Image (spheres, rainbow, N blue to C red):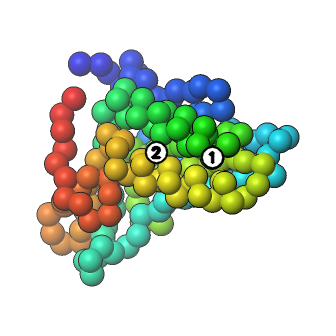
Amino acid sequence: MATQAEEIWEMADEGCFVALTHDHLNAQEVMNRVRSPAAGAIVLFAGTTRDSFNGKPVKELQYTAYNKLALRSMLSICQAMKAKHGLKGIAMVHRLGTVPIAEESILIALSSPHRQAAWRAGEEALEECKSKVEVWKREEFEGEEGVWRANRDGAIGQKVSE
C-alpha cells in the first residue's frame, strides 16, 4: 500500500488543474491557476461545511478518497467542461481529512471570455464531481454516530477501501 508521501496529490493538462489536499484551501491560489488575458470572467465556487443536515447538528465532515482514481476522474471532468464551454482554464481542488464547520471542502475556479459560460460550467462541474469522483464523506453529528455518504447531498454511501 502506498504511503501518503508516495501518493499522487495533483494533476494538470492544458488549462486544467486538479488536486487533493489535507491543507486549508486557498481561493486566491486556485483562481490564479485559471487566470488568462483572454478571460473576461473568473467564477469561483466554494463548498463549505454547514452546521446541520436534515435538522441534525453537524459537528464536522471527514473526507477520504482513492487518490489516483479521484484525480483522474476530476481531470476528465475538467477537460470535458473546458471543451464543452470554451473555458480558458478550470481548477478543482478537494480537501481531505477533517473539514470543520464553515471551512471549504472544495474549490472550483473557471475562467472564460464571458461570464455565462463560466457560470454554467461551474455548476455542471460541481454536479459531475459529486456524482462521479471517488471521494467519500463522513458526517459527524453532535451526540450521535457519524454517517458515511457518497459525496452528494443526502445520498447514503459506504467507504470503499483502496
Assess whether mark 1 and mark 2 are in contact (beta carbons under 8 angstroms).
Answer: no
Mark 1 burial class by Cα count in 10 Å: few <14, some 14-19, many 20+: some
Which image quadrant for residue 159? top left
The residue lying at 26 percent from left, 65 percent from top is: 154
Q: Position of residue 71 (x, y in %)?
A: 43, 32
Residue located beneath label 1 in the image:
85
Residue sticking out furthest to the front: 84
Which image quadrant for residue 43? bottom right
Q: Is residue 120 above or below residue 160?
A: below
Which image quadrant for residue 144? bottom left
Determine whether the residue tagged by mark 1 lies in a helix, strand or loop: helix
Q: Position of residue 152 (x, y in %)?
A: 32, 57
Q: Which mark is residue 113?
A: none
Residue located beneath label 2 in the image:
94
> In which quadrant of the rendered image does the N terminus lie?
top left
Cα gap from disc 2 to disc 1, whole angstroms: 22 Å
Of the numbered discs 2 and 1, the one sitting upstream in the chain is 1
The residue lying at 50 percent from left, 49 percent from top is: 125
Q: What is the three-letter code of the residue carrying label 2?
A: His
The residue lying at 76 percent from left, 54 percent from top is: 114
Residue sticking out furthest to the bottom: 55
Q: Position of residue 58 (x, y in %)?
A: 30, 70
> In which quadrant of the rendered image does the C terminus lie?
top left
Q: Is residue 153 above or below residue 126?
A: below
Determine whether the residue tagged by mark 2 lies in a helix, strand or loop: strand
Tell me the mark number nearer the camera, choosing from 2 and 1.
1
The residue lying at 71 percent from left, 40 percent from top is: 88
- Is there any visible trace of residue 27 in the rendered image? no
Q: Is residue 54 above or below residue 80?
A: below
Q: What is the three-letter code of the residue carrying label 1?
A: His
Pick the residue in front: 5 or 156. 156
Q: Position of residue 89 (x, y in %)?
A: 67, 39
